[in-house]
Image (tube, coloured by chain):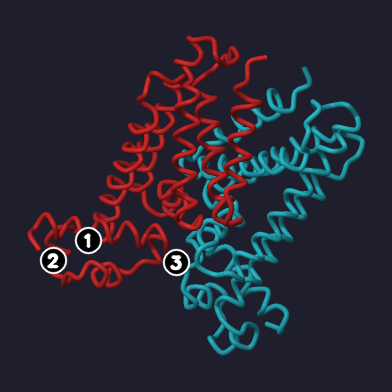
Chain colours: A cyan, B red
Amino acid sequence: MGKTDTKESIIKNGARLVHSKGYNNTGLSDILNAAGVPKGSFYFYFKSKDDFGLSLLDYYWEFIQGMINRYCSDISMTPLQRLENFMDGYQNLFSKMGFNGGCPIGNLMQEMSDLNEDFRAKVGDIYSQMKKRIEQLLEEAHEKGDIPDFSDIDSMAQFILNSWEGSIMHMKLAKSDEPLKLFKHVVFKQLLKKL
Amino acid sequence: MGKTDTKESIIKNGARLVHSKGYNNTGLSDILNAAGVPKGSFYFYFKSKDDFGLSLLDYYWEFIQGMINRYCSDISMTPLQRLENFMDGYQNLFSKMGFNGGCPIGNLMQEMSDLNEDFRAKVGDIYSQMKKRIEQLLEEAHEKGDIPDFSDIDSMAQFILNSWEGSIMHMKLAKSDEPLKLFKHVVFKQLLKKL
C-alpha cells in the first residue's frame, strides 16, 4: 500500500470499528489488525490514539456533509422536503446497518464529553455546524411562509437536532425505525406545521 | 464491612465510576480499589463484570424511581406541573454535577445496545417504564383537558422521552443547562400547549 492508502485504510477500518464498538472499547491492535498494517505505520501517521480519534471525527463529519449535500441541495424541492429527505436518507442507511452503530457524532458526544476536552471541542464544533444547516433550512422555510412564526429559529433547529439524536439512540435500543418515524411525524406534522 | 455493606459499596462505587467513565472504560480493578475490597469479594457477589453491570442498571433505575416518586406523586399539582418539576429536579442535579455524567440509562443504551443482548433487554425494560410514567401523566393531563387532543398519547410520551435523552446528551457536550431549558420550553410551551 502507498502512504495515502495506508493512512486511509487505518482511518476507514478504525471508523468502522469505533462506530460499532465504541472508542475506548476499540484497541489500537484491533485497528491495526483490521487495517493490516504494523504498529510502526500507525505512529508514522498519528501521534497517539487520541490524535487518530480526532481524525476519525473529520472522517465522520465528511460523510455527514456528503449526506447533507446529497439531500439538502436540490432547491427544486421545498426546504422542509429537503430536511425530511435527509432524515429519510439516514433512516435507509440505518436500516441497512440493522439499526446498529447509530450516529457516530452522538456516540462520541456521549462517550467522550467528560473524558477529553479536545474531543469535546471538536464534537461541539461539528454539532454546531449540523445545527446551522438545519437552521438554514428552517430560515428558508420561514421566508417562504411554510412554517409557523417561531420567535427563535436557531433554538428550534437545536431542539430538532437534539431530538433527532435522542431518537437515533432509541433506534439503537429498539433495533427498529419506529423512533425515527415517530420523530418525523411529531416534527413535520406537529411542531413545524402551519396552523 | 459486613456482607451487605460490601456488596453495596461495590455497587455504589461502581455506579459512580461507570457513570463518569463509561462501562467498558471502567476496569474491575478501578471498582475494587474505589470500594476497597479484594477481588475475591467481588466474585462472591457477582458472577462476572456483566452480572455486576446488570445490577448497576437496577441501582440506577431505583434512583430514577425515587426521583419520580418525589416529583410526580403530589396530586395537589397538575400532571404537567409534576412532569416539569421532575425535569427541574434533574436539571438541578445535573447542574450540581457540573453537567457531567448525564443519564446513566441513556449512556448504557448508547454504549451497550450493540454489544450485549442482556444489557439491551434490561435497558429496554427500564426505558419502557420511564416512557409509561410520562404516558400516565399525559393521560391524566388529557383527562383534565390540559393538553391538545393527541391521537396517540403513548407515542407523544415516547417522543418526549427520546427528546429529553437527546437534550441531556447535548447538555453533557455544552456543559450548560441551556439544552434542558430549551427542551422544556418547546415541550411545555409549544408541543403540549392547548391552543
Q: Are marks 3 and 2 on the same chain?
A: no
Q: Which quadrant of the figure contains the C terminus of chain B? A: top right
Front residue of this view, candidates A143 and B100: B100
- Report the residue marked by disc 1: B10
Label 3 SS? loop
| Residue B180: % across, % down | 57, 42
Residue located beneath label 2 in the image? B41
Q: Secondary structure at mark 1?
A: helix
Q: Residue at x 60, y 40 (%)?
A: B181
**Of callouts 1 and 2, which one flags the residue occurring earlier in the amino acid sequence?**
1
Q: Are marks 1 and 2 in contact (CB under 8 Å)?
A: yes
SS type, badge 2:
helix
Is residue B152 positioned above or below A141 on the image? above
The quadrant of the rendering that contains the N terminus of chain B is bottom left
Tell me: B25 left or right of B46: right
Disc number at residue B27? none
Report the side of B124 relative to A32 (left or right). left
Instruction: Say whether marks 3 and 1 touch (CB < 8 Å).
Output: no
